[in-house]
Image (cartoon, grey):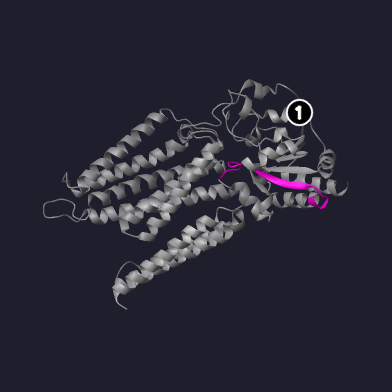
């Protein structure tokens, strides 16, 4: 088979891989088909990588060190498999952030390598023969976006891990540093593009210094951009950084002329951008407002802190069990506390027990509940909760008025009525789950501690709210036993 024919087959394999990506992404729209979509996307990536390796080995047998290539595949694949299987569900957002960092960093390194290789190829007139205007644009965009994603994702992961505090961190002169870093990075990029277009003739080392300067400034900007963002905004930040990773990968595809990288990166970038916008809308905030720092920047209004309007009423496990066992309709509101305690299987057992008694049970899912997009959906899917019982915010909110008991497990900020009533609250205007409209509310928490937004929740002093203080997993186990005894 000639190299040309093989090239056509490789392009066809890329088309199959790209189709798998697109169909797989579509299947991820529903929890019922998300697992199959993930597998289909993985198959598409396997086809694309295999086709590329076959083409490279056939067209240029002397290229690269195959021991390093296959060693990297084995080591990286084994590390990814181990992390995916061993990571706790509570650490999944951190893992996603680390994967974002790896993707962005790899794309930036690929662009840097090609720049160094091609920048030494000069035309007789001294211009950059191999670096035309468009190629240098792709390179500098890849380096800047990939570098911002790399350091930004590492900072986001450190916040989620608790290595850095979740509240906004403001460096002295941080905003000025961010502005200067971005201005310098963009200025260096403009000069590089003009050099690639033949408007300037520089020595190679000058161009490399400009690229390194842009790289360093982008790395700094990634840190200073994410540090001032509060922990409650992390789901949006992770989604945004994921979009950055996709953009960097697409730019890397243009740099090396690889169609499948362009398609995969474009899909990730576009879907991540759309998701970021949807999540920002779900919080009733602009992306710009999130980037300049928001949740956790203050301690909330005085009314919320002092608990004006009522006192906290504690309920025993038996009281909670009676309310649940004799209810007609129960809505369970999962939050990060459920994930921390790994109590998704226990809540499924409780729901099954209530359904066996004729209770209508459903789950209220807020778009930004947890620490990453879709966190609660993934958590409950792991426990094989029936997909029809998972209700998004717009679907479940009208049902709270007809709900006998709303059982809130660790969800704080997404159930905070201050978002509707307290104009001084940092979450004012954010759409929430209307659990306070249920006839009775049971909140399961370990303590009266504030949520990730750093503000108190007036729901806890509502007269129809009973606080059941317990770890989610242990508390649910006791609640299950108490319901069985009814």
Q: Nearer the viewer, residue 477 or 199?
A: 199
Residue pictured at 66% horizontal, 48% vertical: 390
The N terminus is located in which quarter? bottom left
Q: Which residue is mark 1?
A: 312
Q: Position of residue 58 (x, y in %)?
A: 32, 73
Q: Is residue 273 visible?
A: yes
Q: Is residue 104 visible?
A: no
Residue 337 shown left or right of residue 350 in the figure: left
Residue pictured at 49% horizontal, 41% vertical: 277
Q: Is residue 438 above or below residue 352?
A: above
Kindly indicate the quadrant of the structure image that contains residue 439. top right
Q: Is the residue marked by circle 1 packed among few (<14), some (14-19), or many (20+) residues within 10 Å? A: some
Furthest toward the right, the residue is 486
Kindly indicate the quadrant of the structure image that contains residue 8. bottom left
Residue 65 shown left or right of residue 361 in the figure: left
Q: Which residues are magenta?
A: 355-372
Residue pictured at 38% horizontal, 53% vertical: 250
| Residue 367 among those drawn in magenta | yes
* Callout 1 secondary element: loop
| Residue 60 among those drawn in magenta | no
């Amino acid at each position: 088979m000639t190299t040309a024919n093989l090239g056509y087959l490789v392009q066809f394999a890329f088309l199959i891989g790209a189709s798998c990506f697109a169909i797989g992404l579509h299947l991820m729209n529903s929890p019922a088909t998300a697992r199959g979509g993930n597998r289909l996307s993985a198959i598409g990536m396997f086809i694309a990588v295999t086709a590329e390796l076959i083409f490279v080995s056939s067209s240029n047998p002397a290229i690269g060190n195959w021991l390093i290539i296959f060693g990297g595949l084995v080591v990286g694949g084994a590390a990814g498999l181990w992390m995916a299987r061993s990571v706790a569900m509570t650490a999944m957002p951190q893992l996603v952030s680390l994967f974002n960092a790896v993707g962005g960093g790899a794309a930036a390194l690929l662009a840097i390598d090609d720049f160094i290789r091609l920048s030494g190829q000069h035309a007789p007139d001294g211009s950059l023969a191999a670096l035309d205007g468009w190629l240098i644009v792709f390179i500098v965009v890849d380096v800047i976006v990939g570098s911002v994603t790399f350091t930004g994702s590492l900072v986001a992961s450190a916040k989620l891990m608790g290595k850095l505090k979740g509240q906004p961190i403001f460096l002295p002169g941080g905003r000025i540093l961010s502005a200067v870093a971005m201005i310098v990075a963009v200025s260096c990029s403009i000069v590089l593009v003009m050099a690639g277009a033949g408007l300037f003739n520089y020595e190679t080392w000058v161009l490399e210094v400009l690229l390194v300067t842009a790289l360093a400034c982008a790395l700094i900007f990634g840190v200073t951009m994410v540090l001032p963002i509060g922990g409650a905004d992390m789901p949006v930040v992770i989604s945004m950084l994921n979009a950055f990773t996709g953009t960097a990968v697409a730019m890397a595809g243009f740099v090396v002329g690889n169609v499948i990288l362009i398609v995969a990166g474009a899909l990730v970038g576009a879907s991540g951008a759309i998701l970021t916008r949807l999540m920002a809308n779900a919080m009733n905030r602009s992306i710009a407002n999130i980037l300049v720092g928001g949740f956790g920047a203050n301690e909330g209004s005085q009314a919320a802190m002092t608990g004006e309007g009522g006192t906290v009423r504690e309920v025993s496990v038996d009281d909670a069990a009676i309310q649940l066992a004799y209810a007609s309709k129960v809505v369970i509101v999962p939050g990060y506390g459920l994930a921390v305690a790994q109590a998704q299987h226990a809540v499924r057992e409780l729901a099954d027990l209530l359904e066996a008694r004729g209770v209508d049970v459903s789950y209220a899912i807020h778009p930004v509940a947890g620490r990453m997009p879709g966190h609660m959906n993934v958590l409950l899917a792991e426990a094989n909760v029936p997909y029809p019982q998972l209700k998004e915010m717009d679907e479940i909110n009208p049902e709270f008025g007809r709900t006998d008991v709303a059982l809130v497990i660790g969800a704080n900020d997404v159930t905070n009525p201050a978002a509707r009533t307290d104009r001084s609250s940092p979450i004012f205007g954010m759409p929430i789950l209307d659990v306070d409209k249920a006839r009775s509310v049971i909140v399961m928490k370990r303590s009266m501690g504030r949520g990730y937004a750093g503000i108190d929740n007036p729901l806890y002093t509502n007269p129809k709210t009973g606080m059941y203080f317990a770890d989610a997993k242990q508390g649910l186990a006791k609640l299950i036993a108490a319901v069985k005894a009814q």
